[in-house]
Image (tube, rainbow, N blue to C red):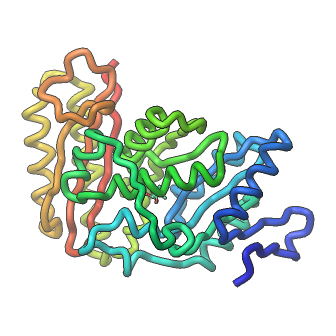
Amino acid sequence: MPAVIEYPDKGEDTMELIRIPRIMQDTCRKHLQKGRSIGFVPTMGALHDGHLSLIRRAKSENDIVVASIFVNPLQFGPSEDFASYPRVIDEDTIKLRELGIDVIFIPDNSLMYPPGFSTYIDAGPVSEKLCGQFRPGHFRGVATVVAKLLNLISPTRAYFGRKDFQQTVVIRRMTRDLDINTEIVVCPTIREEDGLAMSSRNRYLSAGERAAATVLFRAMSTVSDGLQAGGTSISELKKNLISEISKEGLITSIDYASIYNPETLEEIKESGQLKEVLVAVAVRMGKTRLIDNLIVNLT
Ligand code: PAF
């Protein structure tokens, strides 16, 4: 596979596909030297409307848009779905091309993590809460790959979906702590009509599981309404959240379902002075792990 492929039939508007990290770095450096802003959307592929909304936002705010597709082995545990994670590069490339992005970066594992690779980023306490308790090493893998991608691309802005709320907290922490000069833009979760948050992992769900998964948004919305109406204690709302989700027989287990401080990710007992709280859930349905969240404004 050549390092750079240009799509000739795209006329003036060529999209480059780059596979080699150093070429990616040189390409972006040239754009930046010409005074162009770069918007970057990192992905693991299997693109859905959530990803496409990030690309559209990046296009509206930057001169150049770069998207990466890389199923990052570092962020998967040994018993997780790295091998079976959907890889549909051709389908993804068509979608990105239709949106008119400038560069797709699809690096090889061996170039991202060459022999001797041994430096990792640990974002501290925010990576140990919520999903961190159930996916040890996950956020270390995410922070490490995102730091590498930000160093290769030096984007003006990088775009992430709020659906992976904890990931956005970890990445914000990392970019602040390491003085990475990229604005982190967090965009709304995109949902199916019945409320299910779009996710590449929704492809794993059977028809029955897909229908059952809507309980997450319903249960979180009930909590959100309760928080905004006032009058019900946080502990009561948490109990209701767990009991509503547990009633759905196809949910095998609940990793967590509760109400948190959106900055520290600590579970809260009362909302106190907080202007916003995070309602977040992670459940398992057979072999699929689903996460979702809502930010609830209390002002
Ligand atoms: O959200 C994702 O798809 C991944 O965690 C990311 C940010 C692309 C890093 O591999």
Image-based side of 209 in relation to 44, left or right = left
Q: How many callouts does the rendering have?
A: 0
Image-based side of 176 in relation to 11, left or right = left
Residue 291 vs residue 73, the one in the foreground: 73
Measured as percent of width and height from the top left, residue 139 is found at 34, 53
Q: Residue at x 26, y 73 (%)?
A: 78
Measured as percent of width and height from the top left, residue 40 is found at 63, 50
Quarter holding the N terminus is bottom right
Residue 193 visible in this rendered orientation of the protein? no
User: Vertically, is 265 above or below 5?
Assistant: above
Quarter holding the C terminus is top left
Q: To which quarter of the image does residue 157 belong?
A: top right
Q: Residue at x 67, y 46 (%)?
A: 39
Residue 196 vs residue 67, the one in the foreground: 67
Image-based side of 158 in relation to 124, left or right = right
Measured as percent of width and height from the top left, residue 132 is found at 25, 51
Q: Residue furthest top?
A: 273
Residue 194 vs residue 163, the one in the foreground: 163
Q: Residue furthest front?
A: 116
Image-based side of 154 in relation to 272, left or right = right
Residue 82 visible in this rendered orientation of the protein? yes
Q: To which quarter of the image does residue 298 belong?
A: top left
Q: Residue furthest right?
A: 12
Measured as percent of width and height from the top left, residue 264 is found at 28, 32
Q: Residue at x 52, y 64 (%)?
A: 48
Residue 175 vs residue 299, the one in the foreground: 175
Q: To which quarter of the image does residue 221 belong?
A: top left
Q: Residue at x 20, y 36 (%)?
A: 259
User: Vertically, is 119 above or below 61?
Assistant: below
User: Vertically, is 18 above or below 254?
Assistant: below
